[in-house]
Amino acid sequence: MSSDAMRKTIEQNIWIHNYDILRAADAIKTPTIVRGEGAKLWDSNGNEYIDALAGLGCVNIGYGRQEIGEAMIEQLNLVSFVNPFRFVSVPGTMLAKRLSDISPTGPDSRVFYVSGGSEAIESALKLAKQYHHRRGEPTRYKTISRRYAYHGTTMGALSINGVGSYRADFGPLVPGARHVPPPYPYRCHLCKNDHGCSLSCADEVERLIQFEGPDTVAAVIMEPIQNAGGPFPAPDGYFQRVREICDRYGVVLIMDEIISGFGRTGLWFGSDHYDLQPDIIATAKGLTSAYAPLGAMIASSKIANVFADEGSSPFRHGFTYGGHVISTAAAIVNLDIIEREGLVERAASTGKYLRKQLDIKLGDHPNVGEIRGVGLQLGIELVRNRQTKESMRDTKLAGWLTDEMFSRGIIGNADTRGELVIPICPPLNIELEEIDRIVDVLVEVIDLAAKKSHA
Ligand code: PLP
């Protein structure tokens, strides 16, 4: 395709996700990314970038892993498709064993494959609802999730999102989606009258269940370290309390491990930080490190066994491409690489290093409100005034920050789904010199942003 033809097609025919259609032409100002290796990407002009976002928080093992492509081709040459409504595949079965062995839902879990994160969430929500139907409690349809959280864009996932701008134009949404505040000690409005954190945000879950009527609530759904607006790790005891509340009222606890899964936080799953056993987890992204589209909903035996009675109706749900053989083949090699190279442990140690560098170089910056997160899921909340915590939330400023990072060779993002936060979640095998470069660029652009916002 000539470059003119490409420009015209981008202007007229491509619909970029969550992007202003009139700005599609801007996408060609950004040269096409043509190659990747480790945490680095190169564009068609030969410029080099460090990917501080691991794509979209998904390329956990880094770019350029040829062995994954080879396994996919080998699988395609054996059989290119196995109907998931009727048969099982060899890679799907092998992967299910590997996932059950490491999943916080326990070794007797059942793995239901889908194509990505939103589908995993939809599947978890539907499973929770059908589980209650099967147990003779069909009135349970409501869900409790958290404000600012992002769980995907399909109608079920969208409805449980806590990001107002994503929900605004699509009502009425799936009925029954209720929200509680996330743990946000830096701006907590709940524990004001207590001495320190009293886990009032966890108690909000109970208050909401009681208000709605326990016999109407199907599921609580949360990320272990909420990404959007955060990252928000849970304070000590938070998830123990949420687990207890769910058990007390017979509510299914679903953990969204779509970003936090597969080593991102320095343990295999985010739930592992809290010794938490969820009833269901939804996962995707790092499952294949985005070498192929794949998600999984993993159900504990407590949930799955309700579907195991003689003569009972099946989980009425499925997707043609759920657990496609090339994706499950890719996932197996991805897990091999994570294990072989110790990438979970490496995420923990590199995360500590990154956190230290951020604390040293930005910890006292007048426009840095808080640096937070776990492992390689970190973020910096920017403020106009450190004493008053005045918000710096400004979508134009965020766009400008993103562009400034890019022009300095860092693929990053300034996120305004909550307050203005710069997330840092690179591939788990990022080198320490690359971390240093990211931190240097962050210092530069945050200094510039401070001047700009005071000008
Ligand atoms: N849940 C979380 C926490 C996410 O970060 C995302 C995507 O960014 C999703 C769900 C939705 O995943 P997908 O974009 O694969 O549908």
Image (cartoon, grey):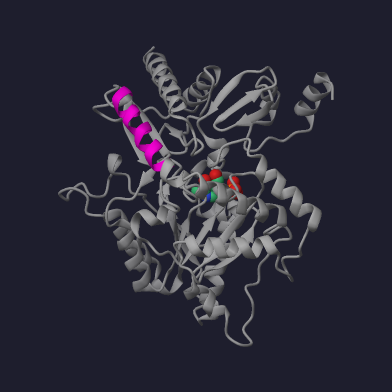
Task: Say whether residue 398 is left or right of residue 370.
Answer: right
Query: Which residues, given as a range, are shown in magenta?
Result: 347-361
Q: Residue at x 56, y 73 (%)?
A: 130
Secondary structure predominantly adopted by residues drawn in magenta:
helix
Task: Give above or below for 244 relative to 263.
Answer: below
Nearest the viewer among 117 and 157 is 117
Q: Quadrant of the N terminus?
A: top right
Quadrant in the rendering for residue 248 = bottom left
Task: Give above or below for 325 relative to 370.
Answer: below
Outermost residue on the bottom side: it is 310
Q: Residue at x 49, y 33 (%)?
A: 430
Quadrant in the rendering for residue 347 = top left
Task: Say whether residue 55 is left or right of residue 319.
Answer: left
Nearest the viewer among 83 and 338 is 338
Q: In the image, residue 226 lies at what x, y percent?
A: 42, 47
Nearest the viewer among 398 and 116 is 116
User: For residue 341: magenta?
Assistant: no
Quadrant in the rendering for residue 110 = bottom right
